[in-house]
Image: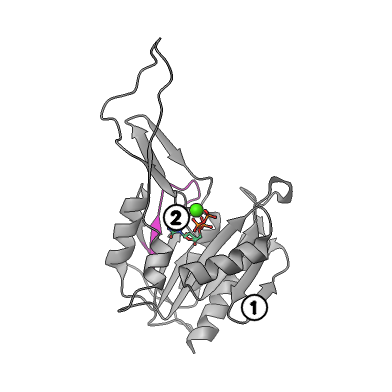
Amino acid sequence: IETALQDGPLRGKRVLVTSGPTHEPIDPVRYIANRSSGAQGTAIAQALRDLGAEVVFVTGPATEPWPQGVLVVEVETAKQMHEAVMSALPVEVGIFAAAVADWRVDGVSDSKIKKTKDGLPSLAFTENPDILAEVSQLKKGRPQLVVGFAAETDDVIAHATAKRKRKGCDWIMANDVSPETGIMGGSENAVVLISDQGAEEWPRMGKLDVAKRLASRVAEALK
Ligand code: CTP
Ligand code: CA
């Protein structure tokens, strides 16, 4: 890894961060995707690097520039992200900030689907691997600390608490992405940290500050 590791409380710790959306092809020119700039994931990778961690950054096609001083693994689809994550293990900490597409198109067309006079195309879907759940539930080689994200539009705490249980991760960083919050695509985030200690509401702050606060909590948890 071609990075000058910094000194700090996470020195010697290997951390994996997933970030950005995934793109799931329909045909050679079309895809379905989630909305994600990659801004929060990039900020988290930088904050962890600044505390001395060796960061593996697995990213889908994000619009935000990649972080510096980390190992970047670029992927397009959820399946590729899954493979990249599994090959990055073992790590001490896994942070899953990517907006992974839940489904991919079944039977991707090798040639461009053309408009025809006899009707609209229909797509069949198949479920993508749940990367966070799989890593959280590893019997051997599970990271010491696994952190997931939950972007919700209502009953944020209830949904995220259930999600934490279902996935088996240690923490969930939950946020309300209802359009009226303006969080989606913005520079701020309002997070609730869900752990076995319950729900801790963080004040609304810049994504960089969310990242710094998370990184210092990670360092504390690893002490
Ligand atoms: N995640 C993942 N792999 C997937 C789907 C989600 O690793 N195939 C991770 C995300 O990176 C995030 C967390 O799981 O950290 C929660 O994602 P979310 O979409 O909120 O959860 P889902 O279980 O897919 O539930 P929902 O039906 O609300 O989309
Ligand atoms: Ca999902």
- Judged from the image, the secondary structure of the residue bearing numbered disc 2 is loop
10 Å crowding of disc 2: few (<14), some (14-19), many (20+): many
Along the line of sight, the residue nearer the viewer: 11 or 221: 221
Where residue 123 sits in the image (x, y, percent)? 40, 32
| Circle 2 residue | 66
Question: Quadrant location of the N terminus?
Answer: bottom left
Give the magenta range. 56-71
* Residue 69 showing in the rendered view: no
| Circle 1 residue | 198
**Residue type of the residue flagged with mark 2:** Trp
Q: Is residue 162 left or right of residue 178?
A: left
Name the residue located 36 percent from the left edge and 29 percent from the top edge: 29
For the stretch drawn in magenta, the main secondary structure is: loop
Q: Is residue 32 left or right of residue 87?
A: right
- Marks 2,1: beta carbons within 8 A: no
Q: Is residue 171 magenta?
A: no
